[in-house]
Image (cartoon, rainbow, N blue to C red):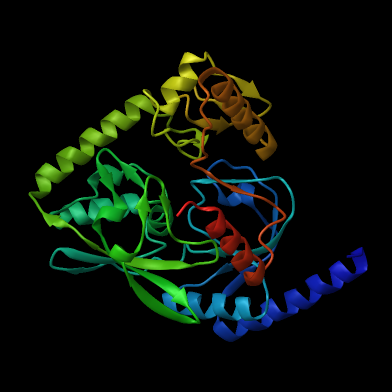
Amino acid sequence: MDEATELNNFAERDNALERIATRLGVRAERGKRFAELTSLRVGGSIDWVLSPETEAQAAALVHEMDQAGIGWRALGSGSNILADDGDHHYVVLSLKELKGELEFDGECVSVPAGYSLPRLCVDAARQGLSGIEGLGGIPGTVGGALWMNAGAYGHEIGTVTETVRVARVGRVVEIPGAEIQWNYRHTSFKEGELLLGATLRLTRDDPEKIRARMDDAKSRRMATQPHGSRSAGCFFKNPPAAAVGTGKMIDELGMKGSRRGSAVISPVHANFIVTEGEGARAEDALALAEEIRERVKREHGIELEYEVELWRANAPKNKAEIDEANAESDRKEPK
């Protein structure tokens, strides 16, 4: 495709987006960068950031974008994302405005995808509801926690999820949690699916005991993880067959404190990569991460899997290409 054709296609897309956003009353912004929207504070330019405020609005929005062939990705707080330094020619659908209010009903709580996960844990504890207090120190939104089945200190969000609300053909649809595969830092949700919220089923307990467990988890986290630094949490998953965790493995290779440009392996926890300085670059963090993977592969024969999500500037394109990529992924998965 020549440059003139590409520019014309972008202009047509931009006009369609402006019409859709205006019709649905969705705030649409240009001129943003991932460096403004992610906890690593790196990443290139974004064509559009759209911010729906209700679940129904978000469902209608993604349906119209899919119908128009406009590529998009959903972004919560950006606490688990490494977006590269290129120009990202797709729409970022920000879920930060999908906060709403919690709805408690006995031992169940309904929560929107944009709600803060740490705040949810505090609110549930005040109601005397247990089952997620170990997640209280994980930054980010409920939607991001659902997408990756966030877990810590004996708790995983998937084990308490009664239903998940997703966008389907312009409407909000509830899916039973039992129909979802909740694996270690991975679920059966597919790229191109938009999670809007969930209902969690928790258990009754003394609020003081819940708070004590939360405080204990916080103390352990403060003692073992970097705080006040620009990070995306644990960079790699723990290999299931390994005798030690990934952080310990990297530490034993003597890589704590190693640097590539603006990216550093945290001296506090070796499974954290932090960025430093103005103008920090994603390519430095990715180069350092790949160096870690190469060393671990060479020394231990283990292929580390990323826990952070890597967002490339050249993807996704539109719903048809996402569906094709998902189908190809399904064909490759062992049955």
Determine whether, in the image, residue 195 is placed left or right of residue 61. left
User: Eyeballing the image, is 52 above or below 281?
Assistant: below
Residue 137, image x, y percentages? 33, 41
Which quadrant: the C terminus? bottom left
Q: Tell me which corner region of the image, top left, top right, bottom left or bottom right, holds residue 216.
A: top left
Does any portion of residue 54 appear in the rendered image?
no
Which residue extends farthest bottom?
A: 23
Which is nearer the eye, 155 or 13?
A: 155
Determine whether, in the image, residue 210 is placed left or right of residue 237. left
User: Eyeballing the image, is 22 above or below 150?
Assistant: below
Q: How many numbered discs?
A: 0
Residue 17, image x, y percentages? 67, 77
Which residue extends farthest front?
A: 335
Which residue extends farthest left?
A: 206
Determine whether, in the image, residue 243 is placed left or right of residue 169. left
Instruction: Identify the residue shown where x is 45% and y is 61%.
Output: 189
Does any portion of residue 137 appear in the rendered image?
yes
Determine whether, in the image, residue 41 is placed left or right of residue 164. right
Instruction: Identify the residue shown where x is 49% and y is 21%.
Output: 250
Residue 11, image x, y percentages? 80, 74
User: Eyeballing the image, is 155 above or below 229?
Assistant: below
Which quadrant: the N terminus? bottom right
Q: Tell me which corner region of the image, top left, top right, bottom left or bottom right, holds residue 124.
A: bottom left
Residue 51, image x, y percentages? 54, 68
Which is nearer the eye, 243 or 76?
A: 243
User: Eyeballing the image, is 115 above or below 247?
Assistant: below
Which is nearer the eye, 131 or 181?
A: 181
